[in-house]
């Protein structure tokens, strides 16, 4: 059995920041502050790029600077003169005239321009940047294979103009057409491409071509990592652990160990600090009712917690002191077709994007047309290609905020039927939601029971052209946009179906 994907969303944002200069707070905030402090002391670090090189290769430099002393690294320094104060300047013509006394000009001398020391690392291309973030199951001590399947596949899109970013996670068992080959699981594209030395970049290039051929999205950049990276990065950023609130008991008796054996891991509900090893286990296990899809949601939870830790003062300080060690230790654990200066500039850009402008999307069961079988009889996921393409487009081109009044007007124009189905074993829950909606001026065309009572969070399913109706209902009920999904289960042929979960009870109590 091959090791399953271990951070479908987990490494996406954090991993990009780590390998693009870690994060803008490290390079833009930290480095810029050190440069300015050095200048204030009358010292000039030769270039911001040199600081980056010092952090990565401290042995190449010999003269210590006060600005970098706290990091235990060294760099060459150059004395500079202190910038002139805006004091009155002596009129040069008057001074050179023997018969005239010196005069003072009322115009202060023009101070020398102070340039942003990191201006050359600002991202200046307005076009969107699309990067495939790939995780393979290669591990140290077990790296004799020449090619690996990608258990983690994430499309990251960054829009420099709108200052937005979005991530879409692809399930490894998605059944797709691989260009110039045949239909296979999407996670085999990297394996095939590396095996045949696919032109233009081997496995990553073939995977990017596969994404383009099946979903119409062109991607040119990639970052590919192996199994070693996660624990090393978390240890550097959060050596004391990260707090996670576990929602349900987890018991995994066959969790893969560091080799190719298994161990038992368990988690009890409640908020708790997880060290790097336990955090990886929590993000990687699939032993819950929803399997891979539950795991993807847990990984996004871990990702948010790690992101907050990285951007904290303590996280930055921990990471700064670990950059040389991580760079050396992880040099053989990732590869990319992006240049170092490009990665650093991209790190600055990511740091300028507010957290509320970052979307996390998972291609889950709501974007699957059917559960099928490969020719060898193994289970695969038949994609709803149109729904997945629409999901990706919503991440690439997020719409601006629309007021609830505007949403209501657009929903009225659609004039689509609305039904409420009970997705729990709580008797009468759909009827109570119907009454709540009617009380707020929403026409409900029927209630019923969902075929399966999975007690999952409330979903709004669309069937046909009912986008604005769904968005109005989500806004009214306080649901996030990811709760709106394409309906592919035959519950309806038109309109919107609200499949209510137990979480809706808090709404009814308002």
Image (cartoon, rainbow, N blue to C red):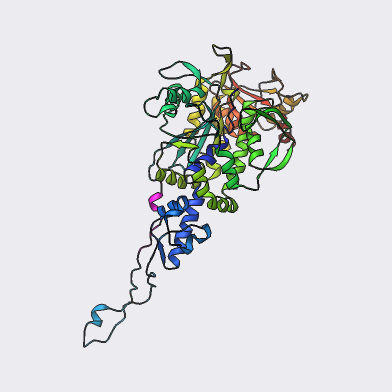
Tell me: residue 376, above or below residue 316.
Answer: above
Residues shaded magenta? 112-123
Decide if residue 225 is on the left or right side of residue 109. right
Decide if residue 266 is on the left or right side of residue 339. right
Q: Residue at x 37, y 26 (%)?
A: 199
**Extreme residue in the bottom direction:** 99
Quarter of image, res 217: top left
Decide if residue 106 is on the left or right side of residue 365. left
Q: Residue 57: horizontal and vertical position, in percent?
A: 45, 51
Q: Using the rendered image of the protein, determine whether residue 402 is visible from the camera's viewpoint.
A: no
**Extreme residue in the left direction:** 98
- Name the quadrant of the N terminus: top right
Tell me: residue 3, above or below residue 303.
Answer: above
Q: Tell me, yes or no, whether the highlighted magenta stretch contains residue 113.
A: yes
Q: Residue 172: horizontal and vertical position, in percent?
A: 55, 24
Main secondary structure found in the magenta portion: loop
Q: Residue 429: horizontal and vertical position, in percent?
A: 75, 26
Q: Residue 279: horizontal and vertical position, in percent?
A: 64, 39
Closer to us: 232 or 271: 232
Closer to us: 382 or 505: 382
**Extreme residue in the right direction:** 427
Closer to us: 432 or 167: 167
Q: Using the rendered image of the protein, determine whether residue 81 is visible from the camera's viewpoint.
A: yes
């Amino acid at each position: 059995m091959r090791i399953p994907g271990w951070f479908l969303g987990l490494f996406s944002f954090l991993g990009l920041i780590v390998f693009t200069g870690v994060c803008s707070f490290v390079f833009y905030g930290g480095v810029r502050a050190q440069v300015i402090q050095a200048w204030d002391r009358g010292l000039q670090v030769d270039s911001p790029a040199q600081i980056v090189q010092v952090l990565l290769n401290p042995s190449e430099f010999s003269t210590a600077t006060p600005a970098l002393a706290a990091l235990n690294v060294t760099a060459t320094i150059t004395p500079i003169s202190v910038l002139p104060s805006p004091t009155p300047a002596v009129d040069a013509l008057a001074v050179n005239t023997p018969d005239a006394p010196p005069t003072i000009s009322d115009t202060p001398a023009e101070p020398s321009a102070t340039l942003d020391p990191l201006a050359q690392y600002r991202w200046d291309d307005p076009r969107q940047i699309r990067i495939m973030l790939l995780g393979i199951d290669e591990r140290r001590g077990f790296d004799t294979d020449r090619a690996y399947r990608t258990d983690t596949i994430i499309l990251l899109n960054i829009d420099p103009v709108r200052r937005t970013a979005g991530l879409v996670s692809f399930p490894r068992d998605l059944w797709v057409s691989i260009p110039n080959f045949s239909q296979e699981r999407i996670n085999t594209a990297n394996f095939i491409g590396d095996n045949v030395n696919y032109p233009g970049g081997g496995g990553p290039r073939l995977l990017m071509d596969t994404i383009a051929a099946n979903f119409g999205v062109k991607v040119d950049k990639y970052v590919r990592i192996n199994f070693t990276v996660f624990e090393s990065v978390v240890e550097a950023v959060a050596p004391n652990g990260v707090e996670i609130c576990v929602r349900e008991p987890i018991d995994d008796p066959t969790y893969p160990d560091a080799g190719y054996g298994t161990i038992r891991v368990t988690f009890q509900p409640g908020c708790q600090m997880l060290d790097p090893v336990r955090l990886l286990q929590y993000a990687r296990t699939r032993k819950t009712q929803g399997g891979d899809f539950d795991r993807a949601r847990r990984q996004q939870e871990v990702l948010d917690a790690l992101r907050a830790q990285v951007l904290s003062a303590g996280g930055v300080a921990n990471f700064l002191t670990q950059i040389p060690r991580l760079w050396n230790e992880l040099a053989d654990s990732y590869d990319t077709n992006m240049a170092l200066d490009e990665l650093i500039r991209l790190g600055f850009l990511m740091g300028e994007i507010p957290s509320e402008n970052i979307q996390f999307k998972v291609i889950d069961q709501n974007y699957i047309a059917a559960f099928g079988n490969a020719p060898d009889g193994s289970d695969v996921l038949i994609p709803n290609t149109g729904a997945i393409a629409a999901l990706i487009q919503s991440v690439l081109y997020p719409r601006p905020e629309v007021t609830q009044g505007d949403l209501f007007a657009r929903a009225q124009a659609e004039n689509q039927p609305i039904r409420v189905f009970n997705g729990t074993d709580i008797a009468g829950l759909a009827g109570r939601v119907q009454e709540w909606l009617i009380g707020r001026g929403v026409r409900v065309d029927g209630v019923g029971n969902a075929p399966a009572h999975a007690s999952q969070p409330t979903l709004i399913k669309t069937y046909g052209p009912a986008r604005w109706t769904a968005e109005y209902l989500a806004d009214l009920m306080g649901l996030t946009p990811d709760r709106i999904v394409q309906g592919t289960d035959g519950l309806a042929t038109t309109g919107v179906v609200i499949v209510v979960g137990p979480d809706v009870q808090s709404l009814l109590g308002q």
